[in-house]
Amino acid sequence: MRTAALRATAFALAFAAAFAAGVASAATTSEVEALIKQRAPNALAQAQALVDAEESNARAWTLLARAQLMQGEPADAVESAEQAVELAPNDAQAQLWLGNSLGVRIGEVNMLRQVAMAPDLRDAFEAAVRLDPGLFDARTALIQYYLRAPEAMGGGTAKAKVQVAEIAKRNAVRGHLAQAMLDRAAKDDAAYRRSIDAAVAAAPQLPASDIDVRSAVVGNLVAQQRYADARDFARAWSQAFPTQAAPQYQLGRIAAISGEALDEGGAALKRYLDAGLSRGENDPRDGFAWWRLGQIQAKQGDTAAARASLQAALRLEPDNAEVKKALDAL
């Protein structure tokens, strides 16, 4: 009996020591956020470990939602963000990431569920803006919502214009991009072009961290089929910030869509897929880069390489219908 008791005590002490070591080695909120921003492979595991260690920490739940979104798990992200908001309803970041999570999740559900979820999405972004008027992402998301939703669901162009004006007061480039959203919704092509030209002209003042804003400029130029202008913008971006991965992806995307500068685009995507460049939190996942590379290789007539790239994309993004379509077309 005494021997058994001693063994049980030893086991308990060993378990406690192991548990304490695990807690001690858990990453801090700042460290987890840095991993997410870098799109580190272990970001989700570290975010989950942080929540396990600090279940009442709203910021930890928000970080978990961000990591889950980054890994393409919006349903889980919604649950994590809801927990963050429950713990800290006056936290702007918690509200922002609840809105972001709902925004991705809503694209995966049927129409009835979309209608049911839309007010929660709107409320989250409106709360985020109310709590932090400088949250551009929340204001931009609200513009999209107001332009798409009927008045009965809280939409309307007048509300969108208010958000555009608030953004323009705070940031010139973002203001031009926000105005472009209005112009595009109004099908005013001339005004839309002027807004994007103004954004391009003002872009050099952007700090290095505004990766998403630069990506939005490129995206709008591509939408206008101004491929040469988009390529010039991405090249200048790459030259200004050579360690960033995002401009490499954009050069590849432009080539894949336009069918122009294919060699340059393919080389850029290979650089993007290389681990040597700095990734941003919202940079496209590798599966999308493999898809674009496969598109380029198909346009170059290299069917074998295209098939290999598209198969790599499908392994990473098994539900991507566009990748499946591209494979079937080979």
Image (spheres, rainbow, N blue to C red):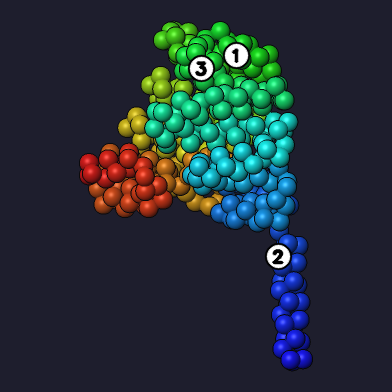
At mark 2, the secondary structure is: helix
Residue drawn 48% across the image and 27% down it: 116
Query: Which residue is under mark 1?
Result: 164
User: Along the line of sight, which residue is nearer the eye, 222 or 140?
Assistant: 140
Residue drawn 42% across the image and 36% down it: 108
Residue 138 in the image: state x and y as whole percent. Answer: 61, 25
User: Along the line of sight, which residue is nearer the eye, 70 or 192?
Assistant: 70
Residue farthest toward the front in the current orientation of the protein: 1
| Tally of numbered tags | 3
Whether residue 18 is visible here, answered yes or no, is yes
Binning the other alpha carbons within 10 Å of mark 2 as few (below 14), some (14 to 19) or many (20 upward) gives few
Query: Which residue is under mark 2?
Result: 22
> For the residue marked with disc 1, what is the amino acid?
Val
Residue drawn 57% across the image and 24% down it: 122
Binning the other alpha carbons within 10 Å of mark 3 as few (below 14), some (14 to 19) or many (20 upward) gives some
Q: Are marks 1 and 3 in contact (CB under 8 Å)?
A: no
User: Along the line of sight, which residue is nearer the eye, 244 or 10?
Assistant: 10
At mark 3, the secondary structure is: helix
Q: Is residue 305 above or below residue 181?
A: below
Q: Which numbered marker is on residue 153? A: 3
Q: Are marks 2 and 1 in contact (CB under 8 Å)?
A: no
Q: Tag 3 or tag 2, which sits nearer the N-term?
A: 2
For marks 2 and 1, give the CA distance: 47 Å
For marks 1 and 3, give the CA distance: 20 Å
Q: Nearer the viewer, mark 2 or mark 1?
A: 2
Q: Is residue 4 above or below residue 194?
A: below
Q: Which numbered marker is on residue 60? A: none
Residue drawn 29% across the image and 44% down it: 324
